[in-house]
Structure formats: structure tokens, C-alpha cells
Amino acid sequence: MSQQPADEFPLSFIARRNFFNFFGITCKILAITGSVLFWVKLKAFRLKEDITIYRGTIKKEPILNIKARQIIDFAAAYDVVDLRSNAKVGALKRKGLKSIFRDEWFIMDESDETIGSIKEDSLFLAMLRRVFASLIPQTYVFTVGGQRAGEARGTWNPFLVKYLVRFLPSASLDPRLAMASVVLLMAIEGKQRG
């Protein structure tokens, strides 16, 4: 799997989104210093997710695309494509019914081989989040090859969903796929939580 320079796709960043509204969801990827690196807008009421990540703050330079393979599938797979080379980077697949109680995803390479997973931090906290959605921030743990690769730790804010994201430099996870996974979590899980 080819790696992109760390300065283009940082290993540590802030992912932030507004609450779902009638016009869709807006996500931003910020540097730790707060400057906008990437911008995402998801249209409301789509049956098949098709998410484009743009460099900077305007829809000028599309760099990544995340697209569902099927319409409304609880165990859907989402392909991640680098739009500059039109090459598939990998895929993310939700673990279907298991995600009712605790969000779980497979991380797959460009050949759809499973290389890792994404899970909510604990079943107990996941169950509490289902009842008190906005009171307990979500934390996702990423593993690749059986080793911890990073985490997306939510912060408590009743008006904004925000994650502090840190991936380990030693993790063998393409940083494009890592960033796309955080965007997808904010889009899909975010729609469920309001």
C-alpha cells in the first residue's frame, strides 16, 4: 500500500462537524493549530453515500472520495479512492448488526483484504451512548495487524461534534485511508446521533 507524505495527510488532527441539518453535514479536518486542512460537505437525504474530501476550505481541489457500494445497507462497504490518481486506496465495511450495540468497522486494503478494525472504546460506554447520545462523547480505537494504530477521541460539546485524532507513525495504515475513516465515522454515525 503506497504511503502519502505525512505533511499532506497528517497523523494528528482535529475532525469537526456541525449537527445534521436540512442542508446536510459539513465536516472539517483541522491541523492541531486550528487551521483548516480539508473540507467535506455531505448532501442530506441521500440513499447512497458519496462523500468527497476537498483540500482547504472551498470545493476547488477534490482529493479523496468515499462511496457506498450499495444503497442503504447496514453492513455496507465504502470504497476510498484517491481522486488525483483515480486509484482505490482501500475500503471500510461496517460490521452490520454488531454495530447496533457497539460501532465496529473492518479496515480493508485496495484488494478488499481485511487489515484492521475500528471499534468504539467499550461496550458499556457504547450502550450508555445509545441512551445519552450527546452526553457521552464517542471514542474509536483503530487497530491494524493486531496492533493499536490510533484513536479518534470525542470531546463533550452539546453544539459541535469534535474528535482529537492521533495515529501512530509506526502504524501501517495509509494516512489517506485513516483520514477517510474518520470522515466516514462522522458522517454515518453522526447521522444516527443527530
Image: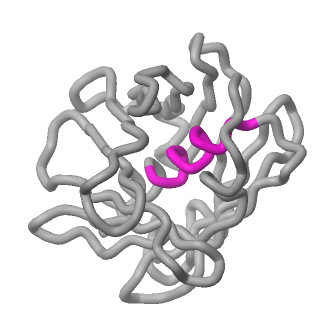
Front residue (pair 8, 159): 8
Where 17 sits versus 167, above or below? below
- Is 25 a magenta residue? no
Q: Position of residue 59 (x, y in %)?
A: 25, 57
- In this picture, residue 99 sits left or right of residue 124: left
Front residue (pair 80, 78): 80
Determine the residue positioned at 72% across, 31% down.
116
Determine the residue positioned at 11% across, 65% down.
23
- In this picture, residue 66 sits left or right of residue 114: left
- In this picture, residue 86 sits left or right of residue 41: right
Magenta: main secondary structure equals helix
Which region of the structure is painted magenta? 173-183
Q: Position of residue 38 (x, y in %)?
A: 44, 61
Q: Is residue 121 visible?
A: no
Quarter-wise, where is residue 164 in the image? Answer: bottom right
Q: Position of residue 71 (x, y in %)?
A: 22, 27
Determine the residue positioned at 59% across, 11% down.
111
Q: Quadrant of the C terminus?
A: bottom left
Where 183 sits versus 178, above or below? below
Where 71 sits versus 183, above or below? above
- Is 181 a magenta residue? yes
